[in-house]
């Protein structure tokens, strides 16, 4: 039997919520072909020797810094770019990006498009609608959830409170509550899928720096209409494209990984 290549997957999740999005589902599929060890930087450091270290995060995120500053013993370095619009750093052997909007920024690198949603969880349940609008994302200025105050009807915002920037998050939450918007801290993926199913429209008013790609796909997979703001071209292609699932995500990741191993 051939020995599986060893991959360290490095990320940071501060909340103890099950990690079951499209990326995790894709990595679970890839674990049949690669020896993948997960390292949550919120809980400790990376230890061991690996053929590849693959991170998830924005440039200058904890995962990015750990990889670029050689704090992982690995032959090759790769990053799944998430949540920003910065130009890439050239310290990587491999980059993955989520939308075609990002492609020009990585054209001089070894880069592959890879994205999808976990359609085992995010799917239509044919539920009666309770909310006119739902918005999902970290309570931060880049997510601009306060713009939902201008919408009418029953509105719900689900987002992670920034523990390291509590003042900003609480200011956003207070504004929402004062305008009659229901607010929840982050919930489990299965609960989130149910809330998408209970909503008519998912409103993602993020800036280009604020991400929102995952929420757009998850909401669409659950049967929601999706609305964005016109100053965020990064999300436009996700509004009417075929919804990529975690099987396609795994295939795309594998293609890139095999190019460097």
Image (cartoon, rainbow, N blue to C red):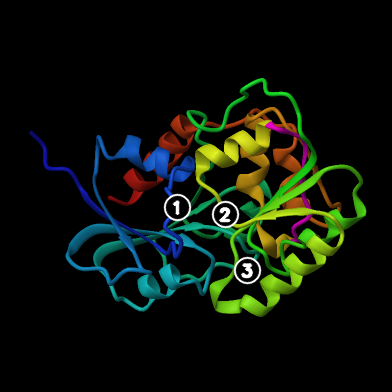
Q: Is residue 68 above or below residue 81?
A: below
Q: Looking at the image, do the residues carrying marks 1 and 2 touch, with CB atoms under 8 Å apart?
A: yes
Horizontally, residue 67 falls left or right of residue 99, namely left
Q: Residue 17 carries which label?
A: 1
| Residue 202 painted magenta | yes
Instruction: First in sequence, mark 2 or 3: give its number.
Output: 3
- Residue 31 visible in the displayed image: yes
Q: Quadrant of residue 181?
A: bottom right
Q: Look at the image and give the residue range highlighted in magenta.
A: 198-207
How many numbered discs? 3
- Callout 3 environment at 10 Å: few (<14), some (14 to 19), or many (20+)? few
Position in image of residue 67 (x %, y %): 36, 70
Residue placed under numbered mark 3 in the picture: 86
Q: Which of marks 1 and 3 is in front?
A: 1
Residue closest to the far top? 126
Q: Looking at the image, do the residues carrying marks 2 and 3 touch, with CB atoms under 8 Å apart?
A: no
Query: Relative to the observer, which residue lies in front, 102 or 226?
Result: 226
Mark 1: which secondary structure? loop
- Callout 2 environment at 10 Å: few (<14), some (14 to 19), or many (20+)? some
Horizontally, residue 118 falls left or right of residue 224, namely left
Q: Which of marks 2 and 3 is in front?
A: 2
Q: Residue at x 84, y 64 (%)?
A: 178
Horizontally, residue 60 falls left or right of residue 35, namely right
Residue placed under numbered mark 2 in the picture: 186
Q: In which quarter of the image is residue 216?
A: top right
Spatial separation of the CA atoms under disc 2 and disc 3: 26 Å
């Amino acid at each position: 039997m051939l020995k599986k290549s060893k991959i360290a997957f490095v990320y940071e999740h501060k909340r103890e919520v099950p990690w079951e999005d499209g990326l995790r589902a894709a990595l679970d599929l890839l674990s049949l072909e690669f020896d993948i060890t997960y390292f949550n930087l919120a809980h400790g450091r990376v230890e061991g020797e690996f053929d590849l270290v693959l991170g998830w995060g924005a440039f200058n995120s904890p995962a990015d810094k750990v990889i670029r500053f050689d704090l992982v013993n690995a032959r090759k370095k790769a990053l799944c770019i998430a949540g920003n619009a910065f130009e890439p750093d050239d310290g990587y052997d491999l980059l993955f990006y989520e939308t075609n909007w990002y492609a020009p920024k990585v054209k001089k690198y070894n880069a592959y498009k890879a994205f999808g949603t976990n359609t085992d969880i995010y799917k239509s349940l044919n539920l009666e609608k309770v909310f006119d609008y739902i918005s999902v994302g970290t309570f931060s200025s880049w997510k601009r959830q306060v713009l939902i105050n201008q919408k009418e009807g029953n509105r719900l915002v689900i987002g992670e409170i920034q523990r390291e920037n509590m003042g900003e998050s609480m200011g956003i939450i207070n504004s929402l509550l004062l305008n009659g918007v229901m607010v929840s801290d982050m919930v489990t993926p299965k609960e989130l899928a149910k809330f998408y199913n209970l909503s008519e429209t998912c409103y993602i008013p993020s800036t280009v720096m604020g991400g929102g790609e995952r929420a757009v796909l998850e909401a669409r997979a659950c049967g929601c209409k999706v609305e964005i703001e016109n100053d965020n071209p990064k999300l436009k292609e996700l509004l009417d494209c075929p919804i990529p699932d975690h099987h396609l995500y795994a295939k795309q990741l594998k293609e890139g990984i095999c190019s460097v191993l």
